[in-house]
DNA sequence: CTGAAAGCGCTTACAG
DNA sequence: CTGAAAGCGCTTACAG
């Protein structure tokens, strides 16, 4: 009616909108169900939770009322009285990151069917944002926390860990190592480098991750140690700094070339860097793997579809996520977290080849 | 002490663990602060919310107690009494998807500083999981919902939309078009195809997305219409079905080749399909773009780093996410959502070239 | 098996 | 400006 009358007026949209909002009735509560089923709220609650016997007839009446009024319990209210929110906070770094996305997916899978739900918050690799995200999660009463990487201080983390269970992936809390999923960064990097050495490469470049990151440091150490074991020198001119992004890989490749470094292989600190380096190589007319062999780290879902498919160190983030989720569930059940370090595996595809000539 | 005594016993770890749990004191409440500051809980609440005057001295005492006891308000309790959770539910499809990840990142950015926080749940492209995720979000009392794609029924969505504000991205709710961010799938696909035609290509293959998806259908329609406008026939043998994954792109390419189709260009329904097709082409010894030109859709962050960098239709998911977030905020503020359709833009990179010869 | 009462942690009228 | 009271929606002893 209103609609008709106002058909052409400028205010039409606003009025329409008001109509929409007015349609929103407030949802039924336990008391509404109790009334409809002629029982007390306690009884409704009993059929809801199922942990107390209820006369079949009353149960049926309650169930009917629930269905009829389309009732759904308010989980926040339930959390308040039970002291358990059934939510697990996940601190991730960015929703747009493939790496963290796969980890997050694994966590979701690992939590599925447990009754617990993940709540994600991102730190954008910034200490202040990470802390804000962490605080928000705790304020929302999550029952446990899974922290994925990041750089917030151990002090903050330990303070939280004193209040609720915390599991970390890819970072360590001193004193709580049991609750930290360690990644074999060092081992993986070493085997990647050794793979290149085994193929006959002698001048192997390395593009690092963010030097402040533990992952990046350990991978570099693995690279250096593999060289040392083969009695190959560690040449600073063959090492360029990256920051785990594609762009940094491209830039690092440029800088390597600009400084006149000669190399027949590259070990990139992660796959994204390898993508960037690969583009840089093709811009220079260098073929992979004929002219330069390339190894990454992580094995992102898309790495198998690079041209050529990327040889890389698989972390299996999906499995790590599942593992972290399971450990959290165990912690919540009062059991040992039981977190075995995540094994790493070299996946040889087509971006590496025997040194020619 | 305990530790010492049990040093070598099998039960040691369990006991250690018990210690850890015992350290978790329950956090202080408003009443604790009130007591510590010698005021009533009401006054504590007043300084917390700041929307009622409080005597400076009492305020100072309260603030001191808060700091001293390290108090943080229980957001669930607050949500219960206020009837607002300050949470926005986001239904996404998969945490591991780059496409949805970028959308999610945009939403986070758009919500930043608003006081509202996103809560993500994924539907894994499955109707039942989507409904479960949606239900969970509503049960957790989110104040609004942003639905990213998906295939759950409009009935379910409308039912929810009648209870809380809903904004959708990449799907339409009949009757609530104002709250739906439309993507120019048709226009984008048409301009991508036209680009290939302008380069002289006449036999242009298309690898589709999931046929049940609206996006996929509209993109195909854009492809077909562009051909028709150029008086080019639509040849079914040049159309292969994909499902938006890299793998499906590879498979579709194989099937195209297997059926003996001849083509000089491919329009893929999204970038991931293009990645897979690109690998398939290189497996066949076909160069991009010298032998076959390739266009994608979406412009994922990594597409600029493909070799060669992919020509594609940019959707700008980041901006779409921000836009959806802003619209949600407006809806919550009782204003018009004001959702302009997301414009699409052809980004010409290096995977397309003029037809030779 | 069931209802009345108390309470989870907070906020908001209400009456000073 | 402030405290006592009531209440958000639910659950859990408590006493039948």
Image: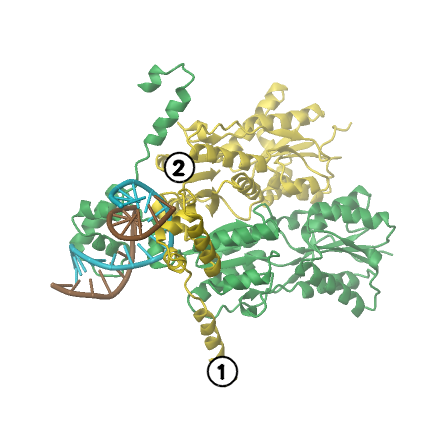
Chain colours: A green, B yellow, C cyan, D brown
Q: To which residue does mark 1 refer? A: B1
Of A253 and D2, which appears nearest the observer?
D2
Closer to the observer: label 1 or label 2?
1
What is the chain letter for disc 2?
A: B
Which tag, 1 or 2, sits closer to the chain's start?
1
Answer whether residue B191 is visible to the viewer in this image: yes
Identify the disc placed on residue B153: 2
Q: Quadrant of the C terminus of chain A?
A: bottom right
Q: Secondary structure at mark 2?
A: loop
Of B196 and B98, which appears nearest the observer?
B98
Tell me the residue at 79%/65% (across/down). Answer: A227
What is the chain letter for disc 1?
A: B
Identify the disc placed on residue A3: none
Tell me the residue at 53%/30% (across/down). Answer: B183
Answer whether residue B262 is visible to the viewer in this image: no
Q: Position of residue B317 (x, y in %)?
A: 57, 37
Q: Quadrant of the N terminus of chain A?
A: top left
């Amino acid at each position: 009616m209103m609609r008709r009358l106002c058909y052409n007026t400028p205010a039409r949209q606003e009025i329409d909108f008001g109509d929409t909002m007015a349609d929103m009735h407030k949802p039924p509560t336990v008391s509404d169900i109790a009334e409809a089923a002629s029982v007390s709220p306690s009884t409704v609650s009993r059929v809801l939770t199922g942990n107390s016997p209820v006369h079949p007839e009353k149960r049926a009446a309650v169930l009917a009322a629930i269905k009829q009024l389309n009732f759904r319990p308010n989980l926040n209210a339930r959390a308040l009285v039970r002291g358990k929110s059934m939510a697990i906070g996940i601190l991730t770094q960015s929703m747009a990151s493939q790496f963290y996305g796969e980890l997050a997916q694994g966590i979701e899978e690992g939590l599925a069917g447990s009754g617990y739900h993940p709540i994600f918050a991102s730190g954008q690799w910034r200490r202040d944002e990470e802390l804000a995200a962490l605080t928000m999660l705790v304020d929302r009463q999550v029952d446990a926390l899974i922290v994925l990487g990041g750089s917030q201080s151990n002090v903050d983390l330990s303070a939280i860990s004193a209040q609720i269970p915390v599991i970390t992936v890819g970072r360590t809390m001193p004193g709580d190592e049991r609750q930290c999923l360690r990644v074999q960064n060092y081992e993986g990097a070493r085997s990647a480098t050794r793979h290149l050495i085994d193929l006959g490469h002698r001048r192997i470049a390395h593009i690092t991750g963010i030097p402040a990151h533990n992952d990046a440091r350990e991978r570099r150490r693995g690279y250096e140690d593999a060289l040392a074991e083969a009695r190959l020198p560690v040449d600073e001119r063959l090492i360029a700094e990256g920051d785990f992004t594609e762009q940094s890989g491209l830039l690092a490749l440029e800088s390597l070339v600009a400084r006149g470094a000669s190399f027949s292989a590259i070990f990139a600190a992660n796959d994204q860097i390898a993508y960037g380096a690969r583009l840089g190589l093709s811009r220079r007319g260098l073929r992979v793997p004929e002219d330069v062999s390339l190894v990454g780290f992580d094995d992102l879902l898309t790495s198998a579809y690079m041209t050529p498919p990327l040889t890389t160190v698989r972390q299996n983030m999906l499995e790590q996520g599942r593992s972290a989720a399971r450990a959290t569930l165990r912690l919540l059940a009062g059991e040992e977290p039981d977190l075995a370090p995540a094994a790493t595996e070299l996946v040889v595809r087509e971006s590496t080849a025997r040194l020619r000539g």
